[in-house]
Amino acid sequence: MHLPRRAFLRTSGAALLTLSTPAFALEKVMPAAGAARSGVRSLKFENIHTGEKLAADYFLNGAYQPQAMQAINHVLRDYRTGDVHTMDPKLMDLLFDMHGQLETDAAFQVISGYRSSQTNGMLHERSSGVASKSLHMQGMAIDIRVPGRSLVNVHQTALKMGRGGVGMYPTSNFVHVDVGRVRQWSGT
């Protein structure tokens, strides 16, 4: 079959885009069949800006799973620029433990995961509530909400854990958690 040059380029570009986007980013990343569930750490995310959903077993047999961590990095990317950054495994462990404390199997709704310096600078100019050296830029912070759980419940759960920064943003409808130094604040 012969395709005109423009049709060929369009088709090739679409194929290249498909190949450059990790297929596993939208799928469930699970361990090999027969793997024991003890010691497995799983997380579920829903990126409210991209609509992407991910359920991943990110820790298995005493080790972080590179493919699952890569899928998490992709889903938590800066949706404004498309930049992907390595998310801190300690943040994933904090979310895993929060999930257990919240006694839910709902996905974390992600408002903001990784932020490029470009995005963070733009947000900082618009709002005094955005730190100029935000831990979002290091993959150490995430802004979330949890369906079926109040912001107050999510906020209090994160505070009780005492494993990093926790900010409550009731007007914007999210809780910020990070794995930096322990501190707390309220925003809008």
Image (tube, rainbow, N blue to C red):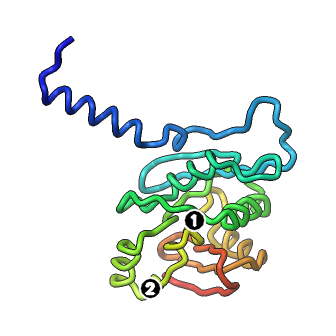
**Circle 2 — which element?**
loop
Front residue of 140 and 12: 12
Looking at the rendered structure, the secondary structure element under dot 1 is strand
**Which residue, given by chain and number where applicable, does mark 2 sit on?**
132
Name the residue: 72% across, 66% down.
Answer: 94
> What whole-number distance in Å separates the C-alpha atoms at marks 2 and 1?
20 Å
Please name which of the two marks, 2 or 1, marks the residue nearer to the observer: 2
Residue 39 placement, left or right of 72: right
* Viewer-nearest residue: 5 or 60: 5
Question: Residue 78 — which label?
Answer: none
Q: Is residue 101 left or right of residue 58?
A: right
Q: State yes or no: discs 2 and 1 in contact (Cβ < 8 Å).
A: no
- Give the position of the N terminus as an image quadrant: top left
Dot 1 corresponds to which residue?
Answer: 144
Across and down, in percent, residue 49 comes to: 42, 56
Q: Is residue 4 left or right of residue 118?
A: left
Amino acid type assigned to the residue bearing label 1 in the image:
Ile
Q: Position of residue 101 (x, y in %)?
A: 79, 63
Callout 1 crowding tier (Cα within 10 Å): few <14, some 14–19, many ≥20: many
Considering only vertical position in the picture, is 37 above or below 106? above
Residue type (three-letter) at the residue carrying disc 2 = Ser
Within 10 Å of disc 2 (Cα), the crowding (few <14, some 14-19, many 20+) is some
At a point 13% along the width and 30% down the height, the residue shown is 6
Q: Nearer the viewer, residue 44 or 151?
A: 44
Q: Position of residue 89 (x, y in %)?
A: 67, 62
Residue shown at the point (62%, 60%) measured from the top left: 146
Residue 163 x %, y %: 74, 77
Q: Residue at x 48, y 76 (%)?
A: 171
